[in-house]
Amino acid sequence: MKILIVSQYFWPENFRINDFIPELIKRGHTVSVLTGIPNYPAGKIFSEYKDQPSKFSAYKEAEIFRVPIITRGSGSIRLFINYISFIISGCIFGSWKLRKFKPDLIFVYEPSPITVGIPAILIGKLKRVPIVFWTLDLWPETLIAVGGIKSKSILWFIEKVVRYIYNNCTLILGQSRSFISSIQNHCDYPERVHYFPSWAEVLPSPVNDS
């Protein structure tokens, strides 16, 4: 199966999706990745990427399609611009770069923001393929708890965006059982929501010389 991973963050940035891809390849799938320019967590483009961007065009046999974005920088306004830039760039440049590529499935990795689903949905509609959305961070709950957003009009708009994204996905995965009911509350198709946990990290045990 040809799988397109859509993730705003990816190697050399340190995220769990980096571990997921080798496992998919090991199981016989062909994997490609649509992502941005590495700049997390410092908010600046990685110096290694600046020096040799071609070194970061493939990962564990997976081809990487990178789109230009405005880096995170510092502060909430710059972070918001960073989110918007990936939406726009993913839709425009992502669609163009993938114009000759036809996946069988799109898999969206969402540690936050949920808006990573917007370019995935556009590409999914253009390619007419199913979309699997893996939710690792709840919206709009996270924005209320961490972002301190209290404006009813802003929250209303965000809820509409969240519902649009969930409603346009074939399958929605929640990394925690506690996520399921919340996701279903923001989706018109609760039967599409299922539990899919993150895997445990296996660390080497110290050798006992005795």
Image (spheres, helix red, strand yellow):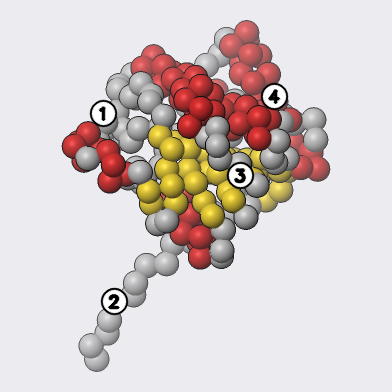
Residue 148 falls left or right of residue 172? left
Give the mark nearer the N terminus: 4 vs 2.
4
For badge 3, the amino acid type reads Pro
Where residue 103 is drawn, which disc sits there? 3
Q: Which residue is mark 2?
A: 206
User: Tags 4 and 2 in contact by the CB under 8 Å rule?
Assistant: no
Q: What is the secondary structure assignment of the residue under circle 1?
A: loop
From this view, report whether residue 148 is shown above or below residue 206.
above
Q: CA distance from mark 4 to mark 2?
A: 49 Å
Closer to us: mark 4 or mark 3?
3
User: Tags 1 and 2 in contact by the CB under 8 Å rule?
Assistant: no
> Quadrant of residue 132 in the image?
top right
Quadrant of the frame with the N terminus: bottom right
Q: What is the secondary structure assignment of the residue under circle 2?
A: loop
Closer to us: mark 1 or mark 3?
3
Residue found 34% across the figure and 75% down from its top:
205
Q: CA distance from mark 1 to mark 4?
A: 31 Å
Q: Find residue 70 and report its horizontal and vertical position in percent.
A: 35, 21
Q: Which residue is mark 1?
A: 44
Few, some or many C-alpha atoms within 10 Å of disc 3 (few <14, some 14-19, many ≥20)? many
Residue 156 falls left or right of residue 202? right
Give the mark nearer the N terminus: 2 vs 3.
3
Where residue 164 is drawn, which disc sits there? 4
For badge 4, the amino acid type reads Tyr
User: Tags 1 and 4 in contact by the CB under 8 Å rule?
Assistant: no
Give the mark nearer the N terminus: 1 vs 4.
1
Give the mark nearer the N terminus: 4 vs 3.
3
Residue found 46% across the figure and 59% down from its top:
22
Closer to us: mark 2 or mark 3?
3
> Quadrant of residue 102 in the image?
top right
